Image (cartoon, rainbow, N blue to C red):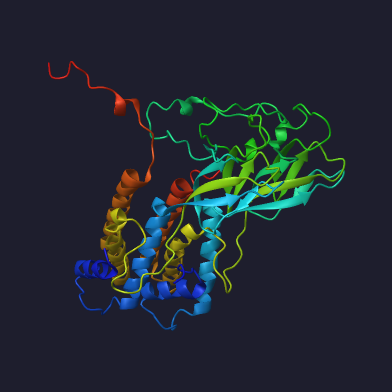
Amino acid sequence: MTLLEIITLSRNQVDEATAALFTTADVLVWVNAAQRDIAAKSGCIEAVTVHSTVANSRFVTLTSGDKVNHVEYVDDAGTILAMGGSEIIFKDVEDDYLKFINDGIYSYNAYNISVPYPDYLPTRITPHHLGHVTLRDSNAPQYWFQWGNSIVIEPTPTAIYTLNVYTSGYPLTVLATDSEVPEIPTEFHDLIPLYVVMMCKLKQKYFQDAAMKYAEYIANLQLAINKYSRKSALRMSDIRLPDSKVGR
Amino acid sequence: MAAYSYSAANIILNVRGLLNELVADFWTDAQLTVYIDEAIRVIAERTGCYRTTASVNTVAATRTVSFTGYKCLAIEYNKSALIKIVPSQVGHIKIDGVTPQYWFELGSTAVIIPTPDTAYALTLYLQGVPAAIGATTPVLPYSVCSIIPYFVVARALEQDRMIAPAAHYMSIFNNEVEFIATGLLQNYPA
């Protein structure tokens, strides 16, 4: 959708084809706010950037505003290895065995928290795990978590290591001309007019209409997040052969 | 073209659009800026989205170290996290040596167990107190700044004694705060 298409659709919805109560400036502000809101809530503007660790520092500084989804360690041979720390990747899978595993710290100075099978499976760590997670026999980065505008690495890197950082960001441009297309993926474009109409209703002080539109916007955004943003591994039910008894 | 900036001027432009007062009349820019700063603090306090770290040293024979922030979430010493306990556990946990091993929060201080015998370098992981917006942009994560205008409009309408409309805006703001706390930040470590 172009900016013009978004504005036309929105103005149709509020029955104000020519700017009057809703100025062109108003609508532009709301279209751009919608795009940022969708990007923030869905994490749909994704990128992978290469970062380097700093010797003897846990902290790797990011671009402001990025949300980190995954981190990979790239070794000298170019082998890429996912690091533990992202959200548990099987959280949407009903037969997820990880949910039965409790993490705990049993001794203040021991590396005695085992990562569930296999070693490379991403699992979440927190600042409380630092120094307590069982490490593979290597000084290379193995776990991470995000802290503000940094990612924190466990163990503390002793040298410079290369990381691939998967992030969700925000629009890098502000829509201004009719022919421009939002940066968020196409499948999220239809949500923008819903947000714009909601803001129009707020300005009109039609709060019941605004609440209805807000509910529609949030519901559709949630559907889009579930369908397009969530990542989950295959479940057994996805690959199981059909039951031969069905239809008998 | 650069990314949208959540400057006070841009937020006020958005707010004035919703208030239908494009040029300052009833609401001055200074008043709206006060509400922006309040919004920033409320978001930071209620969501915990503003995370900072601080390097501090213990003082010999003093159990507490001070910090500036809403909450201390974790403490690291010598590349290892100290274990968080509660005051009733003091004296009932196994101490191994004299270096910092446990901690708990007491007001704006962290109490270190055992009592440090010298200066130890600690890294505190904090839920920080955000600075005022001033001439820059909020220190909050970019992705949460979009809800500031709802709060500012609610406060502005309240100032004009339009309580019901204000409540509508505050309701949206509260919904968004809830979403940030439970949705956007659910994978942030606590």
* Residue B37 location, quadrant: bottom right
* Residue B83 location, quadrant: top right
- Farthest front residue? A77
**Quadrant holding the C terminus of chain A:** top left
Look at 39% across and 51% down and name the residue there.
A42
Q: Position of residue A191 (x, y in %)?
A: 29, 58
Work out whether residue A230 or residue A10 is closer to the camera in this orientation and state it.
Answer: A230
Q: Is residue A106 left or right of residue A226?
A: right
Q: Position of residue A39 (x, y in %)?
A: 40, 56
Q: Is residue A235 left or right of residue B128?
A: left
Q: Is residue B48 visible?
A: no
Look at 53% across and 47% down and name the residue there.
A164
Residue A189 sits above or below residue B160 on the image: above
Work out whether residue B23 or residue B100 is closer to the camera in this orientation and state it.
Answer: B100
**Quadrant holding the N terminus of chain A:** bottom left
Work out whether residue A51 or residue B139 is closer to the camera in this orientation and state it.
Answer: A51
Q: Position of residue B142 (x, y in %)?
A: 50, 60
Look at 68% across and 42% down and name the residue there.
A156
Q: Is residue B20 visible?
A: yes
How many marks can you see?
0
Residue B56 sits above or below residue A143 on the image: below
